[in-house]
Image (spheres, helix red, strand yellow):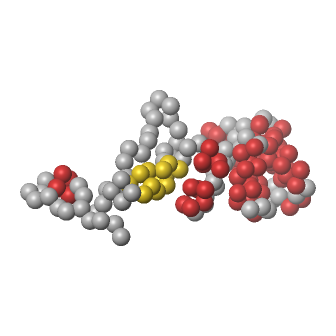
C-alpha cells in the first residue's frame, strides 16, 4: 500500500518505464499522490480525495502485477523500495535465492535415519531474539508420555 512520496515516485517511474500510463486506471490520481508527497493514512477516512489517491496507488500496484510474472514483479518492486511480498509454493521458497540469502531454509539432521532434510527456518530475522531450528520434527507418538502424562511409554514409530 503506497503511502510515502518515495513509494508513489517508484510506482510512477515504473509505469513510465513500462509505457503503460494509459492502461493504468486513475493514473492521474497516482501522479497526484506523488505531487502531494504521499498520503497520511488517518486522512484516508476523513478526506475523499486522499482515499481516492490511496486506492489508486493500490490499484496501480495490482495492475502492475498483472503485467508480469509474480517473481519478476516482486524483484522489481523490491529493487524500487516498495514493500511487497510474493506468494509461492513451499518448494519455491526453499530454492529461492532471496530466501536462501536470508537463511530461511535450514538443513536438519535426522540421526535416527542417517539423513538430513531442509526445513523452513525463521519467518523473520530478529537479532535481539534469534530463532533457530533445534531438532528434527518428532515422530508420531515420540513424546506422548511426556505430553499426556501416560504411564507407559509409547514406542516411537520409524518413518518409512
- Is residue 79 placed above or below 128 in the rendered structure? below
- Residue drawn where x is 44% and y is 41% of the image: 132
Q: Position of residue 58 (x, y in %)?
A: 71, 52
- Is residue 68 placed above or below 10 in the rendered structure? below
Total numbered circles: 0
- Residue drawn where x is 52% and y is 42% of the image: 124
Task: Determine the image quadrant of residue 7.
Answer: top right
Left or right: 50 as drawn, with respect to 88? right
Farthest-out residue, left: 151
Between 128 and 25, which is closer to the camera in this rendering?
A: 128
Between 85 and 119, which is closer to the camera in this rendering?
A: 119
- Residue drawn where x is 10% and y is 59% of the image: 152
Q: Position of residue 29 (x, y in %)?
A: 81, 49
Q: Quadrant of the C terminus?
A: bottom left
- State whether residue 48 appears in this view: no
Q: Position of residue 96 (x, y in %)?
A: 63, 54
Between 57 and 113, which is closer to the camera in this rendering?
A: 113
- State whether residue 143 appears in this view: yes
Farthest-out residue, front: 114
- Is residue 91 placed above or below 45 in the rendered structure? below
Q: Position of residue 15 (x, y in %)?
A: 85, 52
Between 28 and 24, which is closer to the camera in this rendering?
A: 24
- Residue drawn where x is 50% and y is 31% of the image: 127
Task: Determine the image quadrant of residue 133.
Answer: top left
Farthest-out residue, bottom: 160
Amino acid at each position: 500500500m503506497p503511502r510515502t512520496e518515495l513509494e508513489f515516485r517508484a510506482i510512477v517511474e515504473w509505469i513510465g518505464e513500462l509505457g503503460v500510463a494509459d492502461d493504468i486506471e486513475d493514473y492521474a490520481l497516482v501522479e497526484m499522490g506523488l505531487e502531494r508527497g504521499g498520503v497520511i493514512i488517518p486522512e484516508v477516512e476523513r478526506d475523499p480525495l486522499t482515499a481516492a489517491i490511496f486506492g489508486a496507488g493500490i490499484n496501480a500496484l495490482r495492475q502492475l502485477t498483472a503485467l508480469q510474472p509474480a517473481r519478476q514483479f516482486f524483484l522489481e518492486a523490491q529493487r524500487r523500495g516498495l514493500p511487497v511480498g510474493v506468494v509461492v509454493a513451499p518448494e519455491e521458497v526453499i530454492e529461492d535465492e532471496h530466501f536462501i540469502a536470508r537463511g530461511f531454509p535450514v538443513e536438519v539432521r535426522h540421526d535416527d535415519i542417517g539423513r538430513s532434510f531442509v526445513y523452513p527456518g525463521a519467518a523473520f530475522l530478529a537479532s535481539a531474539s534469534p530463532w533457530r531450528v533445534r531438532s528434527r520434527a518428532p515422530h508420531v507418538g515420540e513424546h506422548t508420555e511426556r505430553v499426556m502424562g501416560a504411564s507407559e511409554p509409547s514406542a516411537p514409530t520409524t518413518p518409512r
